[in-house]
Amino acid sequence: MAFTAIDPTTALIVIDLQRGIVDLPLAHAGSGVVDNSVRLVREFRSRNLPVVLVNVAGSPPGRTDENGGAAARRAFPDGWTALIDELDVQPSDILVTKYARGAFSGTGLTETLRGAGVTQVVIAGIATGSGVESTARTAHEDGFHVSLPVDAMTDSVLEKHDHSVAKVFPRIAETGTTDELLRLLESGQR
């Protein structure tokens, strides 16, 4: 687990830090994930690096074992998809609403980031084994360098988080902590 570099045009992607998710039972304290994610957001903004804030407003319509073969879309309560206030959404932020696990599926995010000259992405948020992992996999497959501060993410089940961190992430990304990533940004090692 070690970050080696930050490319000159690196984007931060924050997954599903929204009202309907951050207060759910989580494997790690949601407040810690929010705090670390907000630290990253502030640092990226201060360096005029792209910040992508993602929320989820649905899921793909296909049948799965978990939905009992029903392909119906789920309805969410009012306010469920709203990004949390701590993110302090700014006009410069790239806002993405997804209807899949990953932030790239059907959203045009790859093209948006490529158009901005982005070559690397840092991904944080909830849930490690779902939205974060799916976004990281696609980013890697689309040719981005991927960095994952594992203390800026969590899942509803500790085993899901641990599996992604130990088994999946080393094959598609560099991992480390928020502090390590911030030190790398501050040192200018790009």
Image (cartoon, grey):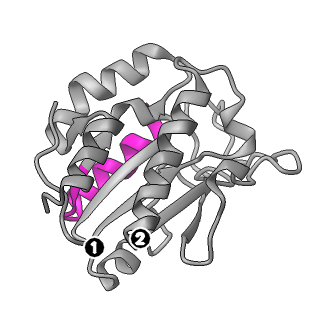
Residue depicted at 68% across the width and 37% down the height: 21
Q: CA gap, disc 2 to disc 1?
A: 8 Å
Most foreground residue, 181 or 164: 181
* Residue furthest to the top: 159
Residue depicted at 39% across the width and 51% down the height: 135
Q: Quadrant of the C terminus?
A: bottom left
Considering the numbered disc 2 on the image, is that residue within a helix, a strand or a loop? loop
Q: Which numbered marker is on residue 50? A: 2
* Residue 114 in the image: above or below residue 28: below
Residue 143 lies in the magenta-colored region: yes
Marks 2 & 1, CB-CB < 8 Å contact: yes
Name the residue that disc number 1 marks.
Answer: 118
Q: Mark 2, residues whose alpha carbon is within 10 Å: few (<14), some, or many (≥20)?
A: many
Q: Is residue 55 left or right of residue 104?
A: right
Point out the tag, 2 or 1, that comes first from the N-terminus: 2
Residue 159 screen position, x and y as percent: 41, 14
* Residue furthest to the bottom: 115
Magenta highlight range = 128-146
Residue 138 screen position, x and y as percent: 31, 56
Q: Amino acid at mark 2?
A: Pro
Q: Is residue 14 left or right of residue 138?
A: right
Residue depicted at 20% across the width and 44% down the height: 173
